[in-house]
Image (cartoon, rainbow, N blue to C red):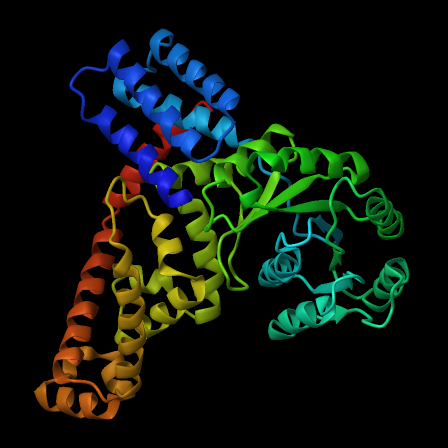
Amino acid sequence: MLDRLGTSLKDAVKKLAGKTVVDRAAVEELVRDLQRALIQADVNVRLVMQLSEAIKKRALEEQPPKGMTVREHVLRIVYQELVRLVGSAGEVKLEPQVILMAGLQGSGKTTTTAKLARYFQRKGLRVAVICADTFRPGAFDQLNTLCSRIHVPCFGNPGEKDALKIVREGLKSLSSAEVIIIDTQGRHALESDLIREIIDIQAIASAQHRWLVIDAALGQQAAEQARKFHEAISIDGVIITKMDGTAKGGGALSAVAETRSGIVFIGSGETIDDLERFDPDGFISRLLGMGDLKALVEKAEETLAAAEVDVNAMLRGKFSLRDMYNQLEAVTRMGPLKQIMSMLPLGNMEIPEDAYDITSTKMQRYRIIMDSMTAAEMDDPSVIGSSRIQRIARGAGASPEEVRELLRYYKMMKRALKGVRGGQGRFNMQRMLKKFGGGT
């Protein structure tokens, strides 16, 4: 959904950017293109028409701020109104808390609970999970397996049918944890007996946050579920899952935003790290091809620290093969390359789908080749001549050409870092963010 919607929005914006004159006709054409893109993404027609009217009115009546062209002004309005459409982000605090997870059966709630535990764990908090789903066979086994992979305690009792008892015992048993996440039974918002149970669980747990997990495939129907759950336990945040696999994601996103239940996270992948903090500005920036540097920096800071990559040293010009090896390890930990690239401001540059897979495979090959190098070669690649290339290739089960390709890649990376050190990219980025983000 995001790929298709992002491509359609970028095409609409690109068409406007290519016009010599931005007049009423150009604005109306842009609005029609935006309407088509959003309706195809299942966004409610009424919301689309409200957005269209707001963009048209502002674009034709507001004067551009000083130093901004009419074209930039119109694009800025599009950006601001799209941010308004997806609503505000729900609050997430890095402090001791209890979080109650609610949601429909099949929404991905149990997997999301483990992903959430991983999120807080990576932020340095002691996390534990309680499995209060006494209905679904294998619920505890699934959650316990996911939690054990990331070394997070998971409390539960598959033989106990009283969810309230499990929660009471779990809270007592896990009292040393800073963040406790309670996974509850999947239920429909209209099933009164199950809603009663979650109200009782909330009475016992006094959870600071009640987060609703919603499958993006629900589309516009997500609004009714969010409202009903909110009436029961005062939902203060929504997590939308499976955003990578449905054409209805735009409907779910806008429907939830309309209920004023802030979106806290978006799930868009299979791995335990594929849970992303929702930020309206960053989300729309990525859809428009402007990247999301804030999210990328946050993700990189966590990962690079774990991989012992000295960014400052590299920017000062000290960049060895050992640094590059650590970098490749860090990129692998950061998640799918496609996700990382979406956070970079690539404008309207389209990257072929198969390029991501090829790059991931190459990174793995490069690491194997570097494992065949000596410490001296890793620290000073300039010593690697033809005889050493032959030896490294034999040790890695690679061809000499692959080793040369790695060395060329290393030189290209080193040149790129020199360019970053020049600061030109940073200046342009600040200018762009100031123009588009200012005044929202």
Q: Residue at x 81, y 66 (%)?
A: 174
Label tally:
0
Task: Report whether 50 appears left or right of 222.
Answer: left
Residue 429's image quarter? top left
Position of the N terminus, as image quadrant, is top left
- In the orientation shown, which residue stands out farthest toward the top? 61
Residue 361 percent across, percent down from the top left: 29, 71
Residue 48 is situated, as x and y percent measured from the top left of the image, at: 46, 23
Residue occupying the point 46% across, 56% down: 299
What percent of the width, then of the height, locates residue 215? Answer: 58, 47
Name the residue: 86% across, 50% down.
Answer: 197
- Residue 122: x percent and y percent? 58, 62
In the displayed structure, does residue 285 sit left or right of residue 168? left
The answer, for residue 117, to whether it is visible in the render is yes
Residue 87 vertical position relative to residue 184 in the rendered view, above or below = above
Q: What is the residue that sits farthest to the left in this orientation?
A: 386
Compared with residue 167, is residue 61 higher up or lower down, i.e. above or below?
A: above
* Residue 152 seen: no
Q: Nearer the viewer, residue 278 or 270?
A: 270
In this view of the protein, which residue sits in the foreground, 229 or 121? 229
Vertical relation: 257 (above or below) 368: above
Q: Is residue 349 left or right of residue 190?
A: left
Splitting the image into 4 quarters, where does residue 27 fall? top left
Q: Quadrant of residue 257?
A: top right
130 relative to 381 in the view: left or right = right
